[in-house]
Amino acid sequence: MRTIDPGLAIRVFDYSDNPRELLREISEPLLHLKGSQQLPVVHVRRGWLHGSHLLLILRPYGERAVDASEFVATATALAAARGASAPDQETYLRRAQELARWENVRDELLPCHPQGTVIAGPHRPRADSPALSQAVDQIMGRFLEPALGSLAVPEADLLPHLAQVLALLARTHPRGISAGALPYRSHAEGAASVTGKHTDLRSAFAARYLSDRQVFLDALQAPVQSDTLRSWERAMQYAWGVAEAHTAGQAVDDRVLQGAAGGGDWEHPLGTPVRSDFIGEILDGGMLRKPSYRHIAHRIVLNVLYAGLTCFGITPMQRYYLCYGLSEGTDELTGVSSIERVRAFSRELA
């Protein structure tokens, strides 16, 4: 049986205002590398540690090695030609320290690499959760081509398009959007909770939703027509299969996910969160005390999708707004509030 080697991790440092442009430029060389060397797993996301960069993972079959020298040379030339520059060390450290607190990262933050730097080295999957690493790699690899297809979406249409992509995950949930959109409510409420002592996010999101309402309703129910969205839909269905195969057999359970997230020992940079009715229902109900394998699978796929969306340069606040809009639209379409649906699903697990 063929195994898959850990392969290469390539970091392409780029500080351009629009990170999609560099990814668009290197997408053809990347697909050529994937096809010519028959790489079974290739995926891409953005990272911030040591500077803003594209992180590409290239994994070959076990008896082969990846020759990425030509790709690295091409990526170096394209990134260097972009004309952007790295921030000064003080600015970088201030931002990196903030992100490290939010994301529970404890790695060394320096150095900050210059624009156009490309670093290639061995990819080291998490040794403490090999089954989770395998599932994430397979799903992220399947998301590569739809993600590259989305690079053609005009800038003005990007957020509506990403709303459609996120909606597809909810729509492909075995229980439909009624269950599939609940994590979006949870994440929007979580953002409002941690910023609640400083900013009224719910009011800001609600005001914007008034003009965007139809965008979200269409994302949740309109026929899937474009080739790119159909590609995303197929990728979501594949992702569900991979994730459920790992969670139904308990190769990945809630304990593994908590460990991968750092064990739950999180800092709250903006102070103690403000608890909402929805957050209270999630914490006090049975859904988290005894999560189903499907709930855990959903978390895996959604976390991978969020990581992939970093390639499009959307901010965390934009993503939380998309979560808010999809959860509001689902409440309207189902006629049942998010809290009521959480209570119903919790009773099923009791």
Image (cartoon, rainbow, N blue to C red):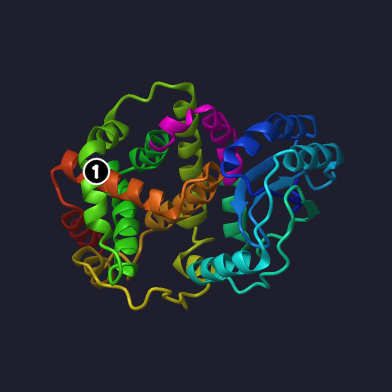
Task: Name the quarter where the C terminus is drawn.
Answer: bottom left
Q: Residue furthest left?
A: 335
Q: Give the magenta part as a residue range.
A: 140-159
Asked which quadrant contains residue 93, the reply is: bottom right
Residue at image location 49% in from the left, 61% down from the top? 250
243 or 302, which is in the foreground?
302
293 or 231, which is in the foreground?
231
Residue 279's spot in the image, x, y percent? 26, 66
Residue 118's spot in the image, x, y percent? 78, 49
Judged left or right of residue 333, residue 58 is right
Judged left or right of residue 200, residue 240 is right
Judged left or right of residue 244, residue 170 is left
Residue labelled with disc 1: 209
Can see residue 118?
A: yes
Residue 269's spot in the image, x, y percent? 43, 74
Above or below, 119 against 191 in this view is above
Residue 143 falls within the magenta-colored stretch: yes
| Magenta stretch: helix, strand or loop mostly | helix
Residue 145 falls within the magenta-colored stretch: yes
Can see residue 127?
A: no
161 or 281, which is in the foreground?
161
Above or below, 66 against 105 in this view is above
Asked which quadrant contains residue 273, the reply is: bottom left
Task: Name the quarter where the N terminus is drawn.
Answer: top right
